[in-house]
Amino acid sequence: MSVSGLPSGNHPKWRSWLLTDTPTSRHHARIASLYQGWLSFRSNPMAMFGLVILLMMGLIAVFAPLLAPHDPFVQDLSNRLAPLGADDHLLGTDSLGRDILSRLIYGARITLYIVILVALIAPVAGLFVGTVAGYAGGWIDTILMRITDIFLAFPRLVLALAFVAALGAGIENAVIAISLTAWPPYARIARAETLTIRKSDYISAVKLQGAGPFRIITRHIWPLCISSLIVRVTLDMAGIILAAAGLGFLGLGAQPPSPEWGAMISEGRKFILDHWWVATVPGLAIFLVSLAFNLLGDGLRDVLDPKDSGS
Amino acid sequence: MTVATDPERGRRKSPLSKALLPVLRTVGTIVATMIGLLFVTFIIGRVMPIDPVISVVGERASKEAYEAAYRAMGLDQPVIVQFFYYIGDILQGDFGQSLLNARPVAEDIRRVFPATLELATLGTFIGVLIGVPLGVLAAVRRGSWIDQIARFVALIGYSMPIFWLGLVGLLIFYGILGWVGGPGRVGIFYVDIVPSVTGMILVDSLLDGNWTVLKDAMSHIILPASLLGYYSLAYISRMTRSFMLEQLSSEYVITARVKGLPEWTVIWRHAFRNIKVQLITVIALSYAGLLEGSVLTEIIFAWPGIGSYITTALLSADMNAVLGGTVVVGLVFVCLNVFSDLMYKFFDPRAR
Amino acid sequence: MKKLQKFALSAVFGVFIGTMAIPATPVVAETPADMLVIANRIDDITTLDPAESFEFAGSDVIRNVYGRLVNFDPLNLDKGYEADLAESWTVSEDGRTITFNIREGVNFHSGNPVTAEDVEFSLRRVVTLAKTPSFILTQFGFTPENITETIVADGNTLKITTDKKYATSFVLNCLTATVGAIVDKKLVMENEKDGDLGNEWLKTNSAGSGAYKVVSWKPSESVTLQSNEDFYLGAPAMKRVIVRHIQESATQRLLLEKGDIDVARNLNPEDVAGVTGKEGISIDSELRGRLMYISLNQNHPELSKPKVVEAIKYLIDYKGMQDSFLNGQYRIHQSFLPKTYLGAIDDQPYTLDVEKAKALLKEAGVENLEVEAGVREAQERVEIAQSLQNTFAQAGIKLNITIGTGKQTLTRYRARDLDVYVGAWGPDYPDPQTNAGTFAYNPDNSEEAKATGLLAWRNAWDPGDLTAKTEAAVIEGDRDVRKKMYEDIQREFQARAPFAIMFQKDEQTGRRSNVKNLNLGGAITAVAYWPVTK
């Protein structure tokens, strides 16, 4: 991926510093390469579109109380199932007369919350298992990978369902359940990366300097696995959102009156024939956010992991 | 899945053990994975805060009726003892009885699994039939409008909540347009008309030569199968495209082109032939995914398959049914994985 | 290159067109004239053995398959129980023994004649198997040890002897319940396994003398019944009845609109409104016995204060719910006996009154109360719970809702583990004792008693003198006195019990207009298919 499309004459000074071919320090080199990556990312309109949507969603989540026209929990039984564009309720009301737009806005918080937690738990767990297995080798590797296989062989949604059923319904438990099903692929990626790095001269050199296995794994192997993990996580985000919505849909995710989008679809599907918007609107919201993550992931892959590059 | 990694490779062994070892290893792996799978499921079932006895005796049971059922179910034994009893039964082909409907779980699975198999097979079929040409085309005409469309189609597939799409699809194609049959496998008065041979209604009605039932079953399966097919299409077309791109930029393709071979030959006879094995792997994985992952689709379409069977059982703490279902699904999954691994090993030039 | 593109495109479109073309064939728009097709939720069926079955959908099947000593006429439920397999009966002077004369000339589906011996076997079987619903018979003092003396066949008659004198109507009403079904002794015993009295076999098979026999039961899928041409009341018009499990109201509605089914039994208010007035579809409304209530766990330090209990009864938007999401399907009802039961009262002392509730809470000195409600995942219950959450909050009570499957929620309820339970209760047999004996009766409230079958016990509530009053009412022989006793019990219960009874069910059924005479069983029994015509 080149950045040849950029005009090369009148760069301001900081730009030429960022685009230099002769970095003056390690930091300079790192920043310069990040900037190059950003430039190439920026030239991908789809990825930028994804990024913008996600940023907007972040802002909506943060400023939900300011943006929402109504309290998302206040009921009005006399004005239930109001249609799209009804007075004062742009997206109508649900079966208890609550404003759907406001619920959607507050729901963004829940989605974001789930996504962030899973994105923190699953890859870290996978990274840990994978690098330990890859670096240690031998029976540790065998056992860890066998466990990974067991979790992989489990039907994902069934496993998540089973855990939520065991722990009780709720957002936190849904997050744990989804993380449990999401970590094995990361462990495999991390292990594969570790296996290629382990034998490299670079690690041998670090070893000669007297670094212990803990230090090698955390300081030298982890950083090298990060970029492929980031790509994978971003691409998986959509799947995570869909899984969370699926749990919500089955009534095992967020509990009422929480405006979780999957649960909103589940409530709305009972009225789908005459009041289709109640289920359709949150469905579109889920779709939009998953799409944004997919676009972003595609773009990031092009930048960070060019060997699998899409376009 | 690299279940069958073989570190023994390269050492000299007698021909017999050379042939046997990988087989034993593979079987061992499957067995170990299955036992682990069972163990995890079993533990989950036992810590679940649902009282399975209530499933049997109902809400209003007296203390005596309750306790009798409790003992009859063996729940007074330690968990680990229960587990070993269970494994012992399974080895004898006995999955136990469903707590919910008092039938042998094996019988239930024989009833529900063909429904899922039918759906997943047709779904994969649709996915392959459209996904492969689309992926090849997108790679060949990289950057063109068709590539963009292919990409977009795949992205939507990755991003759409399947249960939502199913609902909307049902609303439009069944509710409004009336083009397809409603939820369920066949219209209600076609139930039980053709004798059940394979359990798959499409096949059974074909065997029976009953075209009315076949048509009706077709109109019921087409929507959920297309839906699953779409998801499989998204995955297969993307993978096909990336495999093809790799081949098209390889030297022998360039050489072939330089030699002036027709484009058709270059693409299908050379490049495509080389991605076949990888493609089969991908298709097998996607098939496995559909076999295990159609829980939500089955629920939306009232499809009496294994996904909804396990889910219902799980939520009523019918552990025999959950375990039985998980064993079957897990076994299918592991086998498909081993199969694609073996394919890869034996046929892929680079892995050889 | 162009060629390839063309090929791929045509492949893509070919498949699309191919898949669309097949289903475009016309869909049948009407069910056959002698077949009744019903959509219902039947995933609660766990067994078809009448000695064991205790769920709504199971009772529906069993009522049509088995005859009983006494039964209800589906076209005239108000008449009360009538002769069925017992042609007549006499009551002994001390009121403890009832002698039934068994109807001659009635055969089981197998061809075996129905005899007093079969009746004796069926009733003894319930007591011996001691499954969940057996209490309906054992409450009269039958035990596995004494049945050889208390339930006795003699020639063409059957004699039952109770431990005390009970109101005859109470005993006979109990015999109309599912456990009163008469099974074919010979056939059942041919299929006995390990001394189980045929329990295993009867779970999935039928051995009755009723209007229909079971062809197949596929769990959570369908039940198929075939008519009994030799039914003693005449062969039913509907030769085949198929009850198909359809979970979603919207789906049931679509099937009904398309004519794929004749009857949809679980339409929600929105879908009822949606099909009302559509050509060829009629909506029936039938009062059922099911009550919707909330209960407060008396082990909770705050919820056990009488003022708090009273306050909460004023924090329920009865009318708001009845007129919105429960519209047409539940009506306000605030006492534990369903309308149409002996002694039922229609007092409705409570309405939503936030100010009054606040004052009561203040008197009780309760502030910032936060409690957990267990709710099973059924549409109307989740909505009721959310409405309660809303009105409770107006008086400063925070209600946290935990939604679970039926089994999950029930497990916790029975373990006295929930602060608040949003529940439904349906009577087991058409006598006031069925509800009085669970709401207002709890002889031993201790943890060790484990009387998990009693609602009062589950809420750790000691009903005080109501327990004794309930015991007295059940043996009162004079109908009017008995009626008065239940009215008093209910009024006292209404004032101080930690139960807020809220609604009684009206079942709305969507049917194709050509279907006639379908009776669901009112508040007292289950559905009957044999009078149905099309």
Image (cartoon, helix red, strand yellow):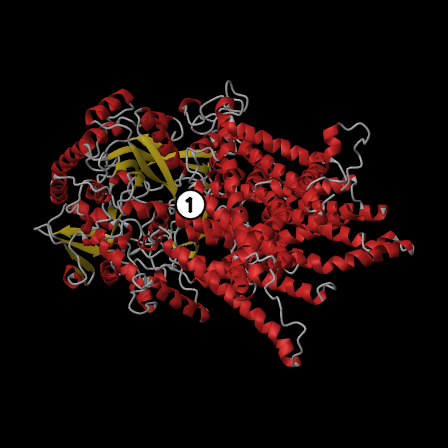
Q: Amino acid at mark 1?
A: Arg
Front in this rendered view, residue A42 or B22: A42
Q: Quadrant of the N terminus of chain B?
A: bottom right
Q: Quadrant of the C terminus of chain B?
A: bottom right
Question: Image quadrant of residue A48?
Answer: top right
Question: Image quadrant of residue A71?
Answer: top left
Residue situated furthest left in the rendering: C94
Front in this rendered view, residue A37 or A85: A37
Please tell me whether mark 1 sits on a helix, a strand or a loop.
loop
Residue B108 position within the rendered picture, expressed as x and y whole percent measured from the top left: 46, 59
How busy is the neighbourhood of tag 1: few (under 14 within 10 Å), some, or many (20 plus)? many
In the depicted structure, whether residue B5 falls above or below residue C289? below
In the depicted structure, whether residue C481 falls above or below residue C105? above
Any part of residue A213 in sight = yes
Q: Chain of mark 1?
A: C
For residue C433, side relative to residue B118 (left or right): left
For residue A175, side relative to residue C363 (left or right): right
Question: Image quadrant of residue C429?
Answer: top left
Query: How many labels, in total?
Result: 1
In the depicted structure, whether residue C419 falls above or below residue C307? below
Residue occupied by mark 1: C41
In the depicted structure, whether residue B240 falls above or below residue A116? below
Residue A60 position within the rendered picture, expressed as x and y whole percent measured from the top left: 54, 28
Residue situated furthest top in the rendering: A87
Residue C8 position within the rendered picture, expressed as x and y whole percent measured from the top left: 78, 48
Residue situated furthest front in the rendering: A209
Residue B334 position within the rendered picture, expressed as x and y whole percent measured from the top left: 56, 62
For residue A42, side relative to residue C318 (left or right): right
Any part of residue C279 in sight = no
For residue A20, side relative to residue C514 (left or right): right
